[in-house]
Amino acid sequence: MGKSETSTVPESRAQDGQVWDSMKITAFVLGTGLLTFAAFRNTLTWHLQSFWGASGDFWQALWGKLYDYYGGNELALYCLGTMVIPGLTFWLFNAVLMVMDLTGKPHFLTRYRIQLGKNDPVDPGKLKEAVKVVLFNMVFLSLPMVLLMYPFMKWRGNPCGTELPTFHWVLLELTVFVLLEEILFYYSHRLFHHPSLYKHIHKQHHEWTAPVGVVSVYAHPVEHIFANMLPSMAGPMLLGSHVATIMLWLCLVLVSTTISHCGYHLPFLPSPEFHDFHHLKFNQCYGVLGVFDRLHGTDLIFKQTKAYERHLLLLNLTPLSQSIPDAPKKID
């Protein structure tokens, strides 16, 4: 066996190991997320049934009442599930974060800030401009795209049917949605970092090196369509999903991307360290789960930082900036 053949064996094994590690990470993240969702759903169902005294399938009964309330107007139900409820979820969550960013209060929450000294408080004028762009993207881009999606969903199946999908089918759909979003977002996001596209399109999003929650949808129109909307819409369009599943998915997407941009590593919420580091350094951590970053080696610098050590679920009330502080800066 020649030297060149011998040298390729360890490289091949390393690549195989990297792919296998990425697959294990994907399975772990998806499995943990779906188990958490299942536990939350079961707990919520039990409490709602106890409060209202409902019997049988609570969610099916609730959907039946909603369907009757709108007189079977499926377009109205579709708009409610794909635009109104996800939109309210996004703005209610971000309203709380914007109060924190503008006032620096309550301190027991703002002390979990990731980039210490940044946005403390946030520039009101800069935040106002960001909100304007987000509103434009939602009203003039997201809304038409979701409406155009409706006839396609009707062609694919019955998105507003009277029967809800089974819980197990919803879990399977969410798994497919997450995987598709991870693939499409990673490669579209990385494409927008190409120099010829970055300066004209993606640079707008990176004006915020220390992001805040609402910046999750602060983007150039082209980026919003191809990197924000299409990766999220691909799964439901592929599977011809029910509007209830689409509503759940869009709410999860908007909440998770807000957490990733919020600038706070809060207890018992997913870690935003990964994407926050992307805003800080620009050329690392392109994905959502980080699976393709591991596969392509676009997280190697991140892994050498304290931010990587802090990239975990905080299960106590001590800010990670205190328990895992940055190394002291060297004095020349």
Image (cartoon, helix red, strand yellow):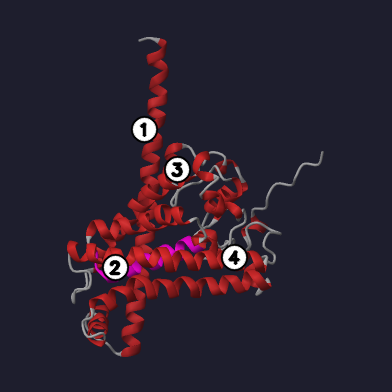
- Pointer 4 residue: 129
Residue 288 included in the magenta stretch of the image: no
Q: Is residue 112 above or below residue 15?
A: below
Q: Nearer the viewer, mark 2 or mark 1?
A: 2
147 or 67: nearer the viewer: 147
Residue 76's mark?
A: none
Mark 3 secondary-structure assignment:
helix
- Pointer 2 residue: 245
- Pointer 1 residue: 16
Residue 276 % position (x, y): 56, 54
Residue 31 % position (x, y): 35, 56
Q: Give the CA distance from mark 1 to mark 3.
A: 25 Å
Residue type for callout 1: Asp
Q: Give the CA distance from mark 2 to mark 1.
A: 35 Å
Start and end of the magenta stretch?
241-258
Residue 322 % position (x, y): 67, 58
Residue type for callout 3: Leu
Q: Is residue 62 above or below residue 22?
A: below
Disc 4 crowd rating (10 Å Cα; few below 14, some 14-19, many 20+) is few
Looking at the image, is mark 3 or mark 2 earlier in the sequence?
Answer: 3
Q: Give the CA distance from mark 1 to mark 4.
A: 46 Å
Disc 3 crowd rating (10 Å Cα; few below 14, some 14-19, many 20+) is some
Q: Give the CA distance from mark 3 to mark 4.
A: 26 Å
Q: Which picture quadrant has residue 255?
A: bottom left
83 or 6: nearer the viewer: 83
Instruction: Give the farthest residue toward the top.
Output: 2
- Pointer 3 residue: 191
